[in-house]
Image (spheres, rainbow, N blue to C red):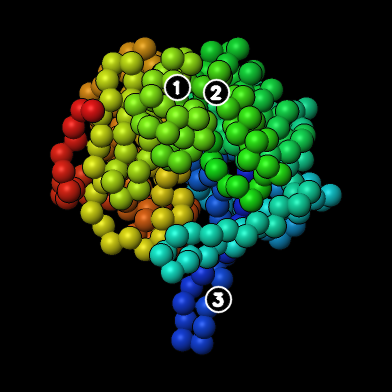
Amino acid sequence: MPDIITIGEMLVDFTTVQAEDGVYYKRNPGGAPANVAVMASKLGVPTGFIGKLGNDMFGHYLQWVLEKEHVDTKGVILDKRFSTTLAFVGKDEDSERSFVFYRQNSADLNLNFSEVNLKLIDECKLLHFGSLLLTGEPSRSAAINTVEYAKEHGKIVTYDPNWREQLWDSKEEAFKAMRSVLRYVDIIKVSELELQIITDCATLLPAIAKLLNMGIRIVCITQGAKGCIIATKHGIERFPAFKVETVDTLGSGDSFFGAFLSRLVLSGKTIDEITMEDLRDFAIYGNACGALSSSKVGAIPAMPTHEEITALIAEGNTDTDSYKI
């Protein structure tokens, strides 16, 4: 049975490809919670995905991808009343990503709690979720009720407050919803911008302290080409990124976190038993995975193998050593 269950959106990313006759879009599977499930599965941890897809060509394609990647699909619902979410991903002159979402009344937003396969939660060790189910009802209630159920049943709960401004009606609504679930969370993965959003703190250390004081046990801050920061009440440490030729950063943070969580689960330790030395190993492994993911186009298609990750770690090609903050 799956050790890691993720709940949320799965969608089709259409990423730009340059050709002699112009630009065209390539279909790639994506969606942050699904990305995490696939990455952990590729690295040897049984995983499952809970979510609703349209009963359409895209939904069938995404379900096939999950099955191909050995992700349990007993929690996947295909609903002919709604369409599968689509995202078109572009880059500006500074190589910053931009998104156009086709998500009006989409399948993932219409997941009801009554449709959630709670048996998967009963049998897992860890539940991971993101913030995009919180953008509307009934998916918001489905996500919160599922997270509450997991917490009540002693599961590790992990959270990615994935900030996509265009999917919210207002920043006020978004920040309130994204912060409302923090009380359930054991481990959080955030970018520096997302850290500021969910804590309302402009500087790093007060923001980290606020999350730890809320009861969050492990804070993972992804910093792209700078690597990541891992913080607990026992210490804060920065881990440098591995040098690779970056092609596409889409999904790299999800790959990082899927790899990080895979090492946590495979350690067989509870959160109380995990040491800073353990977290150092998880973070370095995650950084290598995220770097390799950025060296190819797409999210799921770019995910590396365990052998590729360990080979990059063995090379030790980073700008600096890890250091305490």
Q: Which residue is drawn at 50% across and 30% down?
A: 200
Q: Residue at x 39, y 15 (%)?
A: 270
Q: Which residue is drawn at 25% across and 34% down?
A: 238
- The furthest residue to the right: 81
Determine whether, in the image, residue 247 is placed left or right of residue 136. left
Rendering quarter of residue 276: top left
Out of 143 and 324, give the one closest to the viewer. Answer: 324
> Quick one: label 2 or label 3, which is nearer the N terminus?
3
Residue at disc 2, secondary structure: helix
Residue 24 disc label: 3
Residue at disc 1, secondary structure: helix
Q: Where is residue 122 in the image (x, y as percent from the top left)?
A: 60, 19
Residue 211 disc label: 1
Q: How far apart are marks 2 and 3 (CA)?
A: 40 Å
Which amino acid lies under the numbered mark 2 shown in the image of this protein?
Answer: Leu
Is 243 drawn above or below residue 285 in the view shown? Answer: below
The quadrant of the rendering that contains the C terminus is top left
Count of marks, rendered view: 3
Rendering quarter of residue 306: top left
Q: Residues within 10 Å of mark 1 (few under 14, many from 20)?
A: many
Residue 182 disc label: 2
Q: In front of the other: label 2 or label 3?
A: 2
Q: How far apart are marks 2 and 1 (CA)?
A: 8 Å
Determine whether, in the image, residue 162 is placed left or right of residue 302. right
Q: Do the residues labelled 2 and 1 touch (CB within 8 Å)?
A: yes
